[in-house]
Amino acid sequence: MASAPSGSRSNRAALTPAPGGSTTPVPPGTAVGSAAIWVFIFRRLLLGVLVLVLVSIVIFLATQALPGDTARAILGRTATPASLAALREQLHLNRPVIVQYFTWAGGLLHGDAGNSMAAQEPVTRLIADRIVNSAFLVLCAGLISIPFSVLIGAYAALWRDKAFDVVTSLSTLVLAALPEFVVGVTLVVLFATTVTHLLPAVSLIPPGTKPWEQPLALILPTLTLVIAVTPYVARIMRASMIEVLESDYVEMARLKGLSERLVIQRHALPNALGPTFQVIALNLAYLAGGVIVVEYVFNYAGIGGALRDAVSNRDLPVIQALAMLIAGLYVVLNLLADIATILVTPRLRTRL
Amino acid sequence: MEEKSSRQPLDLRARILTRREALIGAGVLAGGMTLAGVLAACGTTTSTTTTSGTPKRGGNFRLGVTGGGAKDIIDGQNIVTKPDQARLVAGFETLLVYDENYNLTTEGLAESVTQDDPKTWTIRLKQSITFHDGKALTADDVVYSLQRMLDPKQGLFGTGGLGSIDPNNLTKMDARTVRLNLKQADSTIGEQLGQYYNGIVPVGYTRAGTQNGTGPFKVQSFSPGQQSVHVRNPNYWRSGQPYFDQVTIIDFPDTQAQVNALLAGQLDAITDIPFAQVDVVKAHSGLAVLESPGGGWLPLCMAIDMDPFTDVRVRQAFRLMADRQAIVTQVLSGHGRIANDLYAPFDEGFASDLPQRQQDFAQAKSLLKAAGKDGMTVDLHTTDGAAGMVDVAKVFAQQATGAGITVNVKTDPNYYGDSYLKLAFSVDFWGTRNYLPQVANGSIPTAPYNECHWPPASSNYISLYQQALAEVDKTKRVALKHQMQQLEYDQGGYIIPFFNNLVDAYSTKVSGFITSKGTLNLDSFGHGFRTVWFA
């Protein structure tokens, strides 16, 4: 949960105005913290690598265990025993699973994710542009939705039970209940096909061009993702902000005569952001996966389309590479969220 | 579609579509769309739609096609996915061509293709046809193309159907004439050479090399799973054609996105609109639906040598349990015509005179009782291999309860990998074909996809087939085909409830699309995009 227990030592320390005008860290905390935080990051990185290794094993086993014969799936109904055998040989499908794993994992370390079985070209070439496309979409959605939802949540907490709070609470609740494809299809009906014809209904990004060259095509998918993410972040921000505003240290700051603006900026907001970062990280990671649905609705050429196609084709190298990519993203985003949480939470920082 | 080997991609697509429709609740039973054209659409047969005005030059025609993916290819003689069909016909042409009534014509590259005697065919090319690179089309290219089609290592569609041609016995008579000496009598060579995938390629052609055909458009760029751009062939041999400067073929994994793009004006035509969207598109000003009566079918296949279907009375009883009109309504949303357990409706010898089977529970029950199988339970195996394959099984199972039969529908995603062709009762899908080529594919022991294990050992079916293949005289050939169909009608293992329509949509800014009985959508994609233009 969000806020610190009242009266903890670090909170009091934070409330002591520092000579430089900063109300937060005490000098010893700073020195200890900066060294400690590197140790912490290093430890978390090691853990992250360990997690990725475990994830890679799980992914590999799970994909190997996919129902169906990969070679037959690729060759289709025209498969002959001879061509099946040849393809299995070419794809090492007839080697022991453990050998296949190390061949694959070793390749990944060299940036070689193997060849797509369906397209017969390197996975990296197949998905490179799509990664850029998806990343840009997620980036746009993140840059808009995070500040937007933090503001909404904070103001809703400040104006608790006022009209703004009631309206935003209700609408975020409703929007949170809507799956992305409903949001996406609704936006298409509103802005592209039926009600108005202001925006393109699908995002056709010709191969070889970059998504930012087609800004119009980005609007609806970005908006869909923003609507998908904002409710969660805004609601957790509101909840933790309310809790912080009711805490003893905020009360204390107010009693000391600090302006409400200072109270919020220096004391309330940073403490409320801690738990919010965790939710933001989870939502960004979710975006990386949830973008699949949005890409489907808008025919957006991203990793979602590649992943769906790969699953249909039982194209293991592509599935494995994309699953590793998304898993890696989760690990990195969680790490970043933890670091950010520590940086904005003096109590945690000084404890390192 | 026509080809069986396109099952895999279709299968993928159909599955995706099905899921998506369930998600958006658009889901009509029939759902679908279709890729394979198998279920595609619509109902009424009207004739010409928008052929009006003088064709005009110019513009970039944008086509949306479902069913593509990373497996997409461009090859003058093969396809893997549905958008591959559009890409093939834009750049490559065949010797003979089926017209909109599925009649074979000499509108293709050949001036004539004649069967001189049961085992000899002669191909005579038209004059002054050139490839994209300017090279003239000659007999050498035809010989090379046929040899490539017959090379089993290439894994091409046409290989099986042309099996009676001897690749080492193709004689170049002169620069425009080739003689084919067959290994065995075969009257279907002309029909095979009219299949869109048996394109003519220049000597030395490979898939990985330059795409060089005689067709109206040259490939400018191609990204599998995304799009291809084709530019006008300025030296095209038919004067005036094609009209578009450029054709862009865009892959869509989702038909809803495809329809949206059409509604928003981002596309000029799309294939296979979901039945649920037909009215939406029709109601939209500036859009039109092109519904063509296709020859695709989804049979329920009873293996005649497997229990309980070894008894012909059981097969007949099952055929009498189907309410075909209800199946058309529920599975195709009415976008199809009822069938009579016979295939190849556009064939010269289609036995349309045999009485239409109707649902008749009383007779079905008495046949089952006589066979000692009344009240039995049977598994019906199916998969999402093409739109409607699961639905048709479920609707039939429901109808069978009327005769006191319990049909358990078993949906197996790996159906085509493991158990296909080894099942007593299963669902399959087929595209438009004429009778004898279809028999070669599905109704004789040497056929690659003989689901029903037809014919019975005691039958003279195979001998009739061989006589029909060797018969040069049309009247006699038709009589032989009729005898074969009579055997299948009386004893066969297929329950064929319907032929589906193809339902496509296009912007009324485009002129020239007509309804067609051909295999491919949009009147064979406007004959490779050469007979359509922006009005």
Image (spheres, rainbow, N blue to C red):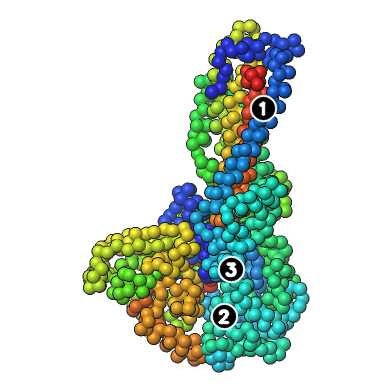
Q: Which residue is mark 3?
A: A83
Residue B129 visible to the viewer: no
Q: Amino acid type of disc 2? A: Leu
Q: Which residue is mark 1?
A: A40
Quarter occupied by residue B321 = bottom left
Q: Chain of mark 3?
A: A
Q: Chain of mark 2?
A: B
- Against B285, residue A344 (above or below) is above
- The local crowd at label 1, few if under 14, some if 14 to 19, many if 20 or more residues have their Cα within 10 Å, is some
User: Where does the image place residue A9, in percent across and percent down from the top left?
Assistant: 61, 12
User: Where does the image place residue B127, in percent across and percent down from the top left?
Assistant: 71, 84
Element marked by disc 1: helix
At a point 64% along the width and 38% down the height, the residue shown is A49
- Against A242, residue B469 (above or below) is below
Please tell me which of labels 3 and 1 falls first in the chain: 1
Mark 3 vs mark 2, CA separation in Å:
21 Å
At a point 58% along the width and 31% down the height, the residue shown is A279
At a point 48% along the width and 81% down the height, the residue shown is B436
Label 1–label 2 contact, CB within 8 A:
no
Q: Which residue is mark 2?
A: B162
- The local crowd at label 3, few if under 14, some if 14 to 19, many if 20 or more residues have their Cα within 10 Å, is some
Element marked by disc 2: loop
Element marked by disc 3: helix
